[in-house]
Every structure is written in structure tokens, then in C-alpha cells.
Image: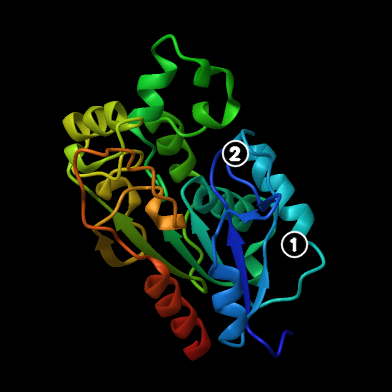
Amino acid sequence: MNVQPTVVLIHGLFGFRKLLWLEYFQDVRQLHEAMGLRVVVPSLPWAGSLEQRANALSHQLQDEEGPLHLVAHSMGGVDARYWINHLNGAAKVASLTTLATPHRGSSAADHVCCHISPFRLFAGIHSLTMNQLQRFNKITPDQSHIIYRSYTAKRPVDEQPWIVRRYGRCIQKIEGDNDSQVSVASGRWGDHIATLPCDHFELIRRDFWFNPLRTRIRFDVLPVYRDIGEWILQH
């Protein structure tokens, strides 16, 4: 058993552990290490299917001793749940905290899969449709000894980055409030901690607001990760 609490940071679709000097969870690893946590950051197939990504997660965590506290952004939360239930990860896990994970799928993924789009080529997109996640949830119940926590996010569509705004409009029509990729309704899982006033990318400290004619209130997510770290230290 690890004496020092271990956090596992799990990246989302099209994500990475580290690209040159750039980390997916920008400044989060350093923050948690400064708080006295041990941090593990797996690298999953960036556009892989749910099964491929979860198997990669399983392989990279096979030598880790529990208890592990999983902190996952976007698809990473679904990868974690797959590993927990279907690849014997449950015994090692104490908690799973997700940030804007499409637990019930995303109508943006449905939209991409039904239209001509280069993103249709990626298996990960097909894993995140609402029908796929509905089937997944039926065979993937929560484990009673694991604490499930979630954060969701939302911004008005006109405050979402223009490069992804069409997906936000699509989700708004079908599911309601969203962060441009995942709705608040889909992101709620277990103990819902808060809905944060930001878009999907601000949750990993990326600002894609490329509008020189209009400003928006910036959101700093680092205090949220500090809260997560403090909660882990208490548990």
C-alpha cells in the first residue's frame, strides 16, 4: 500500500501526457506534488477507442499499488470506469473524480458520426455517442467501495470558442447547458461537486478564445485541482 496518496491524472480524447514541454494537465502535476501527493500520468492512445484506451491504462497501472485516486478529464473518466469494471482495476481504486466526462455520451459525437467530418475516422468519437454510452452504462455499475465525484462545466454558446461553437449549439438543442463538448446532464456522476463557469478546454488550462473584438471573463481552474488534492489528502 502506498503511504503517500497517489493521484492518477487521465487525459481525454486527442490528449497526451506530454508534448515537448507542454503537459496536458498544465501545472496540475506540479501543484499536486507540491501538496505532498504522488502523481502518475499515463499516456493513452490519443484517438483510440474506449477499449484501446482502457487497456493502455490497465497496462500502465498494472504495477501500481493502491489505493489510487483517479482524476480524469473528458473521455478519461469513461476510460477509468471501463478499467475499474472490466479490466480488474476496482481493487486498486479508492476514488474517481471526473471533470466534464461524457458519462451519458455527447450529442456532439452523434453529430460528427452522422455527418461528413474527418473526425468520423477516429474510433474514440464513435465510443462517445449517446447510444454507445447508454449500452456501456448498463454493464458498468458503480463499485460500492469507490467514491465517485464529478465536476461539470458550462458557458453560454456565444462565450464558447468559435472553433467548437457549432458543437455547443448542437448540444444545447438536445441536452441543454454545456461546455462545447459535454453537457452538464451528461457530466454528472456520483457526488456532483459543482458546475464550473468555463468551457471544456479551460478545465485543462487551455484558452482558445481567439476573439480580438470581444472579451470574456477568464476562469482559473487551478484552485479546483487544489480542492481535489485537499479532498484526497483528507481521505
- Identify residue type, mark 2: Leu
Which residue is depicted at the point 28% across and 31% down? Answer: 165
- Identify residue type, mark 1: Leu
Q: Which mark is residue 205?
A: none
Name the image quarter holding residue 161. top left
Residue ID for mark 1: 61
Nearest to the observer: residue 19 or residue 138 = 19
Q: Earlier in the sequence, mark 2 or mark 1?
A: 2
Q: Position of residue 211 (x, y in %)?
A: 27, 38
Which residue is depicted at the point 20% across and 38% down? Answer: 213
Mark-to-mark CA distance, 2 and 1 = 16 Å
Answer left or right for 30 relative to 103.
Answer: right
Answer left or right for 175 relative to 27.
Answer: left
Which residue is depicted at the point 50% across and 87% down? Answer: 235
Label 2: few (<14), some (14–19) or many (≥20) C-alpha neighbours in 10 Å: many
Q: How is the image coloured?
A: rainbow
Instruction: Let me know if residue 135 appears in the view.
Output: yes
Q: Which mark is residue 50?
A: 2
Label 1: few (<14), some (14–19) or many (≥20) C-alpha neighbours in 10 Å: some
Instruction: Let me know if residue 100 appears in the view.
Output: no
Q: Quadrant of the N terminus?
A: bottom right
